[in-house]
Image (cartoon, rainbow, N blue to C red):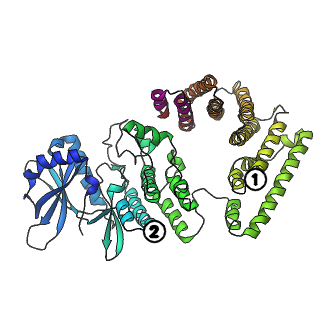
Amino acid sequence: MSLIITCLMSSPENKKSLIKNEEKSYDGVVFNQYKIIKLIGSGGMGNVYLAKRNDGQFNKDVAIKILSKGYNNKSYKDRFLREKQILAQLRHPNIVPLLDAGETEDGIPWFVLEYIEGGIINKFCKSQFLSLDGIVNLIIKICDAIAFAHSKGIIHRDIKHHNIIIENIDGKYQPIILDFGIAHKKDKQNLTNQGSMIGSPGYMSPEQMIGINTIDRRTDIYSLGVVMYELFAQKKLFKGKSILDMHKQTILDLPIKISKIIPSFPKDLQTIVETCLKKKPEDRYQSMSKLKEDLHRWMNGDSIIAHKESWLQVLWRSIKRNKVITALVTTIILISLVSIAKYTYDINKERHIAVNATTESDDLFNYLLKDLYGELTEIGRVNLLQSVAEKNLQHLNKYHFKQTTAKQIKYAKAYRNIAKVLEIKNDNSLSIDAQLKAKNIIESLLKTQSSNQELIHMNVLIHSDLGSLYLNNGQLQLSNDEHQRAQKLVLKLKQLNSTYAKEAIWKASTSYAWTLMEQSNYDLALLRAVPHY
């Protein structure tokens, strides 16, 4: 086996400088039984040299990584030695193996790696014209390797194209993961300063960009999502002229859908990639095993689990494959919607029916207003759901709710769901009206329950949504006012050490950032776009 250590390459200028300064000093030097041939890569804290076994037993090319002389202090030396220790624990066919290690006479550490001959994954897939199935098979093997590292408590933190080499072994392609130089071991002291960014711009997760210390395996899932997106779309996820641009895009921007670039791209495969690229870690796959499972499901033509399908959605997927059944189900949905509209009309006359509505009815109501919208979009009948939303808004506006706190919160949530449907219809006035109704209910409850964290959290969401709606209406001052109210409520949640605080901070910060960007206040927008937990 041989190794092109392209993942360790820095910029061309840095490489030339390091070659000039250090190639002569190690050219021909023998480390144990390995003789240095030439410098083949530079980057980070170390330089990588091609070497050959020198003891006459057998010929073998290896790669030797040596700590750069300019980094020979305790902090960098500890990090370099940590990479060696991490590799010693990772014996996996898709992770570059560690062969040997030691120190020079002047105390500079080095270690020997397998030399892998192959190509960077994106260039390899392009040159070999790999099919989607071929690319997915490679990604499944990469998931295996990263999952193995995660099982050892190791987070790579720098998954990118240059750190994945594809080796051709007897006609079978094997991905090899390289460069654990900035990997994090959970049971070891964190050698990264709190608040600092570490990783490769363009592949770093939003939480890496923010520089928080709570990095876990889901950051590797995001980075692998970037790799997948770029392999499938054949273009960069985000392009920026500066680190600041990349920072803003990673935290705020949504990538162009692959189906917009390649219209025939499979919807489920796009969903898998988009799930990996969710801004919030809790919205992504929670493990590499789950990602791998969905990739296998896609390969086998089964339903994926990324969007947590209900039995209705599984049924919907099945009937779409049969036009006759689709027509039948469409008719059933239309009849159901008419029935629901009739039910809504009837409860205008009988208020006690609404007051005593069951939890199951509330869940169905929320489903119709939110989840079913995506399904109805595909058959062009969104107008039916919007009509139901408007009728329900008219009904809810007639009554003053004096029930339990839990019941009033349900009505507030109903108003918010109605507002979301109306916002999609671009009916901002009715949407604002629905949000204000929700706000009045919540603020009325807060008068007697000022420390109720769920109520405060809902109020943050409502103020943020109102800020976005006023922005869409061009009412910038009103938008600013709502966002500032949301910020004050976020501070209160933080003071209460609320479990809702992180979600509220994220929603309030990113929503406010859009308003500031609309006013061309980019510096403050970027500051608000980085939530401070």
Residue 285 appears in the figure: no
Numbered circle sitting on residue 316 = none
Residue 304 image point, x, y percent? 58, 62
Name the residue at 68% across, 68% down: 321
In this rendering, would 512 be left or right of 353? Answer: left
Numbered circle sitting on residue 131 = 2
Residue 189 image point, x, y percent? 32, 44
- The quadrant holding residue 344 is top right
Q: Are marks 2 and 1 in contact (CB under 8 Å)?
A: no
Relative height, residue 29 to residue 430 (above, below): below
Q: In which quarter of the image is the N terminus?
A: bottom left
Q: Is residue 526 magenta?
A: yes
Circle 2: residue type: Ser
Disc 1 residue crowd, few under 14, some 14–19, many 20+, Cα 10 Å: some
Please tell me whether mark 1 sits on a helix, a strand or a loop. loop
| Measured Cα–Cα span from mark 2 to mark 1 | 36 Å
**What is the span of residues highlighted in magenta in the rendered image?**
507-527
Please tell me whether mark 2 sits on a helix, a strand or a loop. loop
Residue 328 appears in the figure: yes
Circle 1: residue type: Arg
Numbered circle sitting on residue 381 = 1
